[in-house]
Each structure stands twice: as structure tokens, then as C-alpha cells.
Amino acid sequence: MHEVSIAQSLLEIAINNCKNNGFSRIGNIKVLIGKASGVMPDALFFAFDGLKADTIASEATLEIEEVPVSGFCNLCNKDFTTDEKFILACPHCDGLSYTLNSGRELNITEMEVF
Amino acid sequence: MKLKVASKILDANDRIAQENKNIFKEKGVYVINLMSSPGAGKTSLLETTIRNLGGKIKVGVIEGDITGTDDAARIDSLGIPVVQINTGGACHLDANMINEVLNDLPLDELDVLFIENVGNLVCPAEFKVGENMKVMILSITEGHDKPLKYPLMFQESSALIINKIDLKSFLDVDVEKIKKDAASLNQPIKIFEVSCKTGEGIDNWVKWIQTLIS
Ligand SMILES: Nc1nc2c(ncn2[C@@H]2O[C@H](COP(=O)(O)OP(=O)(O)OP(=O)(O)O)[C@@H](O)[C@H]2O)c(=O)[nH]1
Ligand SMILES: [Mg+2]
Ligand SMILES: [Zn+2]
């Protein structure tokens, strides 16, 4: 998996945001992770903790909120939400033509700075 | 204090991918990101494609592997400019890795650049590298259940190359099902059935590439 490159980008974005706003330390960082993003929260925590040492985020923590996969089926015209990691077919009608609305997020939404 | 931010974590990658894309466009190079699981036939497809083109189109190759230079050596022996990237563990190529080797290729002379991604049916589909299109290979020895088990790559690819069809009579694989499922995951996907070993079907694929760049 590629959690290390994700953690690296996350750290860079957080550090840039912190510095650009005139702060010098980072606390808690809130992250949205779609269940279909292919990113495993545990692996991300691990990678993040390994990379943050010796940066202004050395005491930062990650708070991960997982976003379920949801979408709209073009065949039965219904919205759906599922707990599955990947959606193969519409949970209502098994149709294979759908549009995903959520589940692939990999976003930073909020961070604490000092 | 709390800072509200709305950043996509992959923004940095996407930004560098766009930078690469601008460079490729300026140099007039059409870029194909070639993805598959390990051993499906990416390097073999490049070899037959290069032979079939017979120099009519100037091709360059970037080889992405976790370690080793075997694939680059295979391309180099055909007299084609090639750069090997070793990802050192990473399961995919990202935009920055491509950006770092751009100066090692004669971009001014190239018509097409093939980027052979790391063998992996999942992660490469998530990272843009600045390509014009993604193309994936599925070899029939992998089984007909793959489109529905690994939907993302099928959804992200502009073309699916079904390889090793010379082995069809030895296997209980339903090639029609592969085509049907791939098409329902991604309606406009172009599908080619080929054998890199016998050369069957390679003509159609090569003709298609020629129409894309002319
Ligand atoms: N029978 C048969 N064998 C093939 C065909 N295409 C490739 N192979 C064989 O499959 C094996 C793997 O081929 P490669 O081209 O190295 O596969 P790859 O996708 O580049 O592999 P990695 O770079 O390691 O991920 C080799 O032994 C090839 O000779 C084909 O059409 N038919
Ligand atoms: Mg190869
Ligand atoms: Zn439905």
C-alpha cells in the first residue's frame, strides 16, 4: 500500500498551512478518509508517526474520520450507501452503472496550530 | 487555535502531474501510463509494440519497478531510449518520480512515451503521473473475476488489453465475461485481445496508437 506517500503529502500540507498562517507547532489534524480510497487508517497512523519526528508536527496527532461509499444508481435511479470498501454493483438492483458520490476522499479538514 | 483547511492530500501529486502534462504537451509527446498486475505482460507488450512500429513512431519508455533494471535492459536492447525508476518499496509511480527523470529522456525527439507502472492491480490507478491516458493489461491466466474484484483500474483505464490469448485452450477462463464486466464498469473502454507471444491482435492495438498520435 502507499500510505507512506500519503502521509508524506499530508505532513507537507499541514506544515505549509501552519507556517503560512504564522504558527510554529501542530496539534491535532482531522482527516477524512473514504472507505474506497484504498488507504488503511492503521497504516496511515503508523507512517505518519514515523515521518513526523524532527518536524514542527512532531507532537501532532491524526484524527481520522472514515467516509462510507455512497452513490446514485443510473439503472434504478436510487441513492445508496454501503459499509463495503468497494462497490461492485448497486446494492438495490445489482446494476453496474452508477455514479459514486463519496468514498474516495483523502482530505485534511481541520488542524490545531500553536 | 483551530485552522479550517480544505486540502486534498493528493493535491501535491495532482499539481506535479499537471506540470508534467504541460511539459509533455509542449514537447509534443503522447504519454501512456501502462498498468497491470505483476507478470501480465507490460514489458512484453512494449517489446512487440516497438517491433511492430519498426521506427515509424519515435518511442521512449520509463520503467517503474520496486527494484532491479531487467525491464529497462529489455527495452534498451531494442535501441529505444529508456529510464529505469526504482521506487524502493512504493507500490506505484507518482508524479514526482516521473518529474525527476524527465531530463533523462530526449523528449524533443519522441512521439510517444510509455510509462510502465509497478506491477500492481490496485495502487497505480490512484496516482496521476501526467499521462494522456491510462491503459491496463489483464492476462487471461489471472481469471475472469478480476474486473469485478479490482474495479478501480478498469474504471480509470481508456483501454483494456486482454493478453496471453494463445493460452485460451488450456484454461477455463471466460474471456467474454471479462469483456462484458469491463464494459459495464466503464462503458467507453476500448478492448483489445492480444498475444504478445504469437503477435495475434497486436496490429489492431498498434493501429489505434497511431491514430491517437497523428
Ligand atoms: N504465453 C504467453 N506468455 C506471455 C505473453 N505475454 C507475456 N508472456 C510471458 O509472461 C511473463 C511476464 O511477462 P512480462 O512482460 O515480463 O510481464 P510484466 O507485466 O512486464 O511484469 P512485471 O514488470 O514484473 O510486473 C514472461 O515470461 C512473458 O514471456 C503472451 O501473450 N503469451
Ligand atoms: Mg515489466
Ligand atoms: Zn440500482
Image (tube, coloured by chain):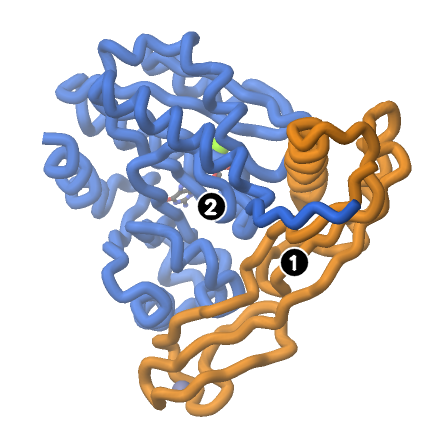
Please indicate whether residue B56 sits to the left or right of residue B172 in the image: left
Please give the chain letter of the residue carrying mark 2.
B
Classed neighbour count for the residue bearing mark 1: other residues with Cα under 10 Å, few (<14), some (14–19), many (≥20): many
Q: Position of residue B83 (x, y in %)?
A: 46, 15
Circle 2 SS class: loop
Which residue occupies 35% across, 76% down? A97
Above or below residue A85? Residue B59 is above
What is the drawing colour of chain B? blue
Above or below residue B125? Residue B34 is above
Q: Report the amino acid beneath label 2.
A: Ser
Chain letter for orange, please. A
Classed neighbour count for the residue bearing mark 2: other residues with Cα under 10 Å, few (<14), some (14–19), many (≥20): many
Q: Taking the image as four quarters, which one is ligand 1 found in?
A: top left
Marks 2 and 1 on same chain:
no
Please give the chain letter of the residue carrying mark 1.
A
Which residue occupies 24% across, 16% down? B27
Above or below residue B6? Residue B16 is above
Residue that numbered label 1 is attached to: A33
Q: Report the amino acid beneath label 1.
A: Ile
* Closer mark to the observer between disc 2 and disc 1: 1
Please indicate whether residue A75 sits to the left or right of residue B57 in the image: right
Circle 1 SS class: strand
Q: Position of residue A113 (x, y in %)?
A: 79, 39
Which residue occupies 55% across, 51% down? B122
Using the numbered discs, state the Cα–Cα distance from disc 2 to disc 1 in whole angstroms.
25 Å
